Amino acid sequence: GDSVTQMEGPVTLSEEAFLTINCTYTATGYPSLFWYVQYPGEGLQLLLKATKADDKGSNKGFEATYRKETTSFHLEKGSVQVSDSAVYFCALLTGANNLFFGTGTRLTVIP
Amino acid sequence: EAGVAQSPRYKIIEKRQSVAFWCNPISGHATLYWYQQILGQGPKLLIQFQNNGVVDDSQLPKDRFSAERLKGVDSTLKIQPAKLEDSAVYLCASTKAGGSQETQYFGPGTRLLVL
């Protein structure tokens, strides 16, 4: 069945460090892929998305590329800030409009 | 544009009691979703509505959970009777038409603790 496997956390980085959070998926067909972010005390917010192979989603300095050959959608940021501290969820949307989430990765950025 | 609204934000009940959550989607959004997010896990879909009809409720524990969207706008999710393992955050989301590439917009969630 459809599923998402996400790098387990927690991840702790110093400010300005490089971030990678790994995400791989299993799906039939051609899903859309998403990264959602959940800041402390807030709801889930869409961070970025990609709807087809080789698409790159980007927002707020974060990027992720839809890699069909490796079934991956890794999240990257070149220089993290304290304000990026949050829980990040990788998700895939199937053709039946079902959104499957990974378990989430908690990122803490220290000054 | 107002986002997805949910209430209450927090609820504490004892096991075997009943509880109801309310969701108001973004204006004009035809599709509404309820998710359950257990601590340390990603959200899991419980039920999906298209207007006032159920599209998918295959993951809803129907012996204790029920949901309705009678007029195709607001929705309520009920648990009766609650169990300890129902402690979770209940998230509501909506999309304009439920198309295959539409972004789901989430509300702040209702955090339920069952004692």
Image (spheres, coloured by chain):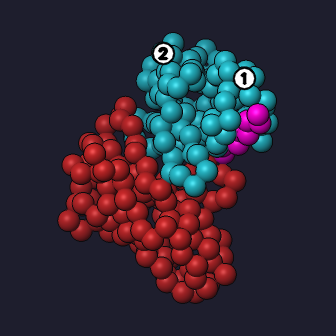
Chain colours: A cyan, B red
Residue pointed to by mark 1: A16
Earlier-in-chain disc, 2 versus 1? 1
Say which of A11 and B18 sits in front: A11
Q: Is residue B99 left or right of residue A34?
A: left
Tag 2–tag 1 contact (CB < 8 Å) = no
Q: Position of residue A105 (x, y in %)?
A: 69, 40
For the point 58% across and 87% down, the residue is B16
- Label the magenta part by its dominant secondary structure: strand
Residue B25 position in % (x across, y down): 31, 55
Q: Is residue A111 visible?
A: yes
Q: Which residues are magenta?
A: A103-111
Would you call the spot at circle 2 few (<14 residues within 10 Å), some (14-19), or many (20 or more)?
A: some
Q: Relative to B99, does residue A29 appear above or below in the rendering?
A: above
Q: Residue at x 49, y 83 (%)?
A: B18
On what subunit does the disc labeled 1 rest? Answer: A
Whether residue B113 is situated above or below residue B33 in the rendered picture: below
Callout 1 amino acid:
Glu
Left or right side of B22 for A103? right
Q: Callout 2: residue from which chain? A: A
Residue at screen point 69% across, 53% down: B40
Q: Is residue A41 magenta?
A: no
Whether residue A104 appears in magenta in the rendering, the answer is: yes
